[in-house]
Amino acid sequence: MCLLQSPWFRYRRNLLRVARFLKKLWQVLILLGVSSHCSLTTFGSGFIPVTDASSLRRLYALDPGSYTHFARTCAQSDEVSFGWFQCEPADPFLPENIDECDGHRGPCAGSVPLWLPDFRHALPGAIRMNAADWILPVVYLVVLCAIAFPLGRYMALVLSGREHRWSKLQCRVEAKIASLCGFDVKEDMNWMRYAGCVLTFSAFSVAAVFGLLSLQGRLPWNARHFESLSWDLAFNTAVSFVTNTNWQAYSGESTMSALSQMLGLTVQNFLSAAAGIAVMMALVRGLVGRKQVEHAELQDGTPNPSKDSNEAVTFLGSFWLDLTRATVFVLLPLSLLLAVSLVTQGVVQTLSEQTTVKLLEPATSSDGKQIADQQLPLGMAASQVAIKQLGTNGGGFFGVNSAHPFENPTGLSNLLQLLAILLIPAALCETFGILVGDVWQGRTLLGAMLIIFVPCVVAAEWAEHTGVSQALVQASGGDTTRDHSSGIASLEGKELRLGTSSSVLWAVATTAASNGSVNCMHDSLTPLAGLVPMWLMQCGEVVFGGVGCGLYGMIVFAIVTVFIAGLMVGRTPEYLGRKIEAREMKLAALVILIPSILVLMGTAVAVMRPEGTSAVSNPGPHAFSQILYAFSSAGNNNGSAFAGLSVNTPFYNVLLGLAMLISRFGLIVPVLALAGAMSRKPVVPRTSGTLPTNGPLFAVLLAGIVVLVGALTFVPALVLGPVADHMDFVAQQ
């Protein structure tokens, strides 16, 4: 007994528990990484069981491609030394030979059954969906929420300036930065001054990036001697990165110098995201008062207004201080952590702009010259990838974004970047709940986001995995005896090392947030699968949305929801103890309507002009979808695209640039005006007739209002685009 109670034994027992936990965690990560490869996936229906030695199991987990090659070689050999297929000389991986080889397996003592894909009913370019394809979204959401809650509590402390363990260090850092930049940390701004600072800072940023890109050819750190950008492309790119859109009408590795990437684009990835967080903080102060945000203690269940909350509080804090806190204490530490993690996975991070490698097989050019070398572009990719995901910016260092192996080389790097896309928007919901004194206020908003997000993931996965069923029937000569009804996924436009399920999850996440990065080509999604990300953008980027701006957009929808519910019961609507009246509703209506007007008007102008229609790559409904997607992306500050649209023209660069400017700052100004209006209202006591805004009922009602607004506004356009495209696809089959 004494031995069992000794500290050494307890230490050893805890160490064994940690080791078992790490082993299980590694198995989960292996499953996530392997399931993102489509050469082999595990535990699914439509798969053929085989047995294998432990060495091959390890090979399977680490490198499915090498495992497939070894299995094929072993099965074709005369000696099957590992107890594999006793089927010679046919290759069991060929569809025409699987029937012959299935079931002829030799014994392998102590081995564990594995599973190989059944290609008997599949076409080239299609794979079957299996259980692992659904495990990834489930585990993704669980891990996301597990990280978001503690991160939200941390952000509530550092963004509000409340007392915490490192508050003295934070104050010293803030004071030092304030003295260097020339602002007062104790300054308190009304909404007009706050908005003026946002607009002035953003205008200066646009001018600085525009000048940098326009003079790129004359500036240093340009080893590949790239020319300066044209005025229209420089304008579009500067506006894109300052507005947190990161729309890219260029390919980064063939257009941008190292100086432009680091000093221009990466810096704006930090500052544009921090500006969104700052505006969100101003709105929260307007809703509950500055003293509540900075000093009140948390009380679960009910809001906790400060002593002076009934007084008219018209000040929203300092924009410069909020910008500093968001950049230095939130974005920089998280980006450093993610960048180091990505480097361990093989994402490039070097000051060298290119390297020369020898080709394994020399090629011959069109003019008959022998090509033995290849120039590979490099650069500081990991640092830019980290902030582009965490800041919901989305602009890729390389042209194909996170589909490039130098940006996203492994299944684990894919998972880390997926988590980073929604991490801060989800965590800010917890931050909001803490700042207003009721954590369930924020969790209700998060619940409403998930109510919309989860069905969108399911719908997109279903559409992409069943979209080629008609093609299978046609390819099989009309043979309906084979199961073509479900489980077949299109691989067009996908990275084989990432797979279809991971690509679809990324497409939904990147458009639910205003991120816009891609690991597959959205233009290659089946029509109905492409409809989902398009519609998520058209909802106003409030389903998670951008860093800061997604949350203040959802708060505006919450105010509209409270107003509609108040009309139904005949009471003056209240949100967080403050009455919602005519002025607040007019401002909320502006926030909701401006992006919709930009999307529909921009699309209408483009389809009426020859400069707009000449840029499409496909005829018919898909051409309309390409244009509609472009303006849905720019008009909601997302940045992703149906890449078949050639947008690097003066017409699209200017038109999309204006849409991005108006969508960003045309919303920030009324949001800050709303914060100023709410801050002047006294807090009214809660009664039995007050609509609770911190429960599942309100989450469902809020999600319904968001869906209803998106449906009523964009259903006609979606019918002309992706729905008609789907009908055309079915008719062609």
Image (tube, rainbow, N blue to C red):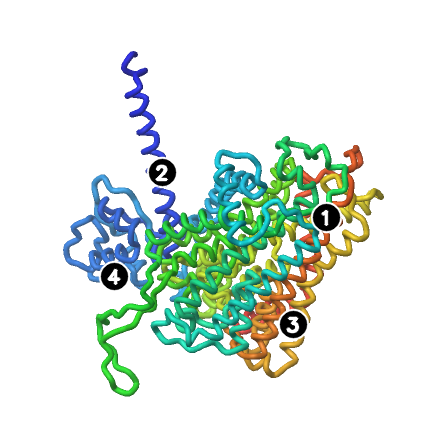
- In three-dimensional space, the C-alpha distance between marks 2 and 4, rounded to whole angstroms, equals 35 Å
The single residue placed furthest to the bottom in the displayed view is 367
Q: Nearer the viewer, mark 4 or mark 3?
A: 3
Q: CA distance from mark 2 to mark 1?
A: 44 Å
N-term mark: 2 or 4: 2
Quarter location, residue 499:
bottom left
Left or right relative to 53: residue 576: right
Residue density around tag 1, few if under 14, some if 14–19, many if 20 or more, within 10 Å = many
Q: Kindly identify the residue that appears in the image at 22 percent across and 73 percent down.
A: 361
Residue type indicated by callout 2: Lys
Q: Residues within 10 Å of mark 3 (few under 14, many from 20)?
A: many
Q: Earlier in the sequence, mark 4 or mark 3?
A: 4
SS assignment at label 2: helix
Residue assigned mark 4: 91
Q: Could you tell me the amino acid type at mark 3?
A: Gly
Q: Which residue ends up furthest to the right in the rendered image?
A: 570
Please state if 279 lies on the left or on the right of 145 as rendered: right
Number of other residues with Cα within 10 Å of mark 2, as a class: few under 14, some 14 to 19, many 20 or more: few
Q: Is residue 94 left or right of residue 283?
A: left
The answer to whether mark 1 and mark 3 are in CB contact below 8 A is: no
Which mark is nearer the camera, 4 or 1? 1
Mark sitting earlier along the chain (1/3): 1
Circles 4 and 3 in contact, beta carbons < 8 Å: no
In primary-sequence order, the first of circles 2 and 1 is: 2
Question: Residue under circle 1?
Answer: 559
Nearer the observer: mark 2 or 4; the answer is: 2
* Residue depicted at x 63% and y 45%: 445
Whether residue 347 is visible to the viewer of this picture, yes or no, is: yes
Instruction: Write the residue at 52% across / 34% down.
Output: 164
Q: Is residue 704 visible?
A: no
Alpha carbons under labels 4 and 1: distance apart: 64 Å
